[in-house]
Image (tube, rainbow, N blue to C red):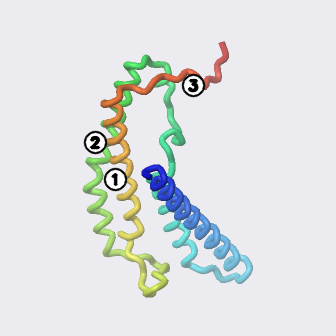
Amino acid sequence: MKNLFQKQINEIIKIIAATMLAALFITFLLQIFSRYVLNSPFGWTLELCRILWVWIVFFCCAFLVKEKDHVKFNLLYSASSNKAKFIMSIISCLAIVVILGWALIPTIDYIDWMKMRKTSTVRFPLTGEKIRLNYIFSIYGIFMISVIGYYIWKLKNLIQNGPEENDKSKLRTIIKY
C-alpha cells in the first residue's frame, strides 16, 4: 500500500513538473512569435518564463532529483576507507542540516517580507490581480525544508544502519591499471 501511494505521489509530482516545463516552453514560443512575427513583444511572457524557471528548478530539486543524480566531487571520498567514508557522510549530513537550518528562518522571513511586492506584468488568471512575490519565492522555502528533512532522514539511517557497503562495481575510473 505504501509503495503504491509513493508511486502515485511521484507520478503526480512528475506531471506537475512536466506541466510547468510545457507552460514554460509554450510561453517562450509565444514570446518569440510576438517579437518576431507581430513585432510587438508581450511583456508578461518574459516575467512568466522567469517565474516558471524558478519553480521548475526548486520544485524538481526538492521532489524529483535523486541524490545520485547530483554532480559530486568525490575523489577524496572514493579513495577513503569505509570508516572515513562513514565519518565524512555524517559530517556532510550534519553540515547541510545545520547550515540550511540556520538559514531557514531568515529565508522564510525574507519570503514573507516579499508579500509587499508584486509582479510587474503577470496577473493571476482568476482574479486579474498581480501576483505577490512571496507566492513566487515560497518554493525556495519548500526546497530548503525538503533538503533539511531528507538529510535528517539520511543521517538517522546512517547512524542506525551504519555506513553503506562499498560496492566496487559502482566505482568508475578513467585510469585503467
Residues 165 and 66: in front is 165
Q: Residue at x 59, y 68 (%)?
A: 24
Residue under numbered circle 1: 145
Q: Are discs 2 and 1 less than 8 Å apart at CB?
A: no
Question: Which of the two discs, 3 and 2, labels the residue nearer the N terminus?
Answer: 2
Badge 2 density bin: few <14, some 14–19, many ≥20, Cα 10 Å: some
Looking at the picture, does residue 109 appear above or below residue 82?
below
Tag 2, which secondary structure? helix
Label 2 is placed on what type of residue? Answer: Val
Q: Position of residue 102 (x, y in %)?
A: 26, 47
* 10 Å crowding of disc 3: few (<14), some (14-19), many (20+): few
Which circle marks residue 171 in the picture?
3
| Horizontal arrangement in the rendering, residue 168 relative to residue 86 (left or right) | right
Residue 106 % position (x, y): 26, 56
- Near-viewer residue (79 or 14): 14
Residue 69 in the figure: left or right of residue 30: left
Q: Using the rendered image of the protein, determine whether residue 43 is visible from the camera's viewpoint.
A: yes
In three-dimensional space, the C-alpha distance between marks 3 and 2, rounded to whole angstroms, equals 29 Å
Give the camera-side residue of 25 and 118: 25
Amino acid type, label 3:
Leu
Q: Is residue 30 left or right of residue 14?
A: right
Mark 1 Cα-neighbour bin, 10 Å: few <14, some 14–19, many ≥20: some
Closer-to-camera residue (107/124) = 124
Which numbered disc, 1 or 3, marks the residue that appears first in the sequence?
1
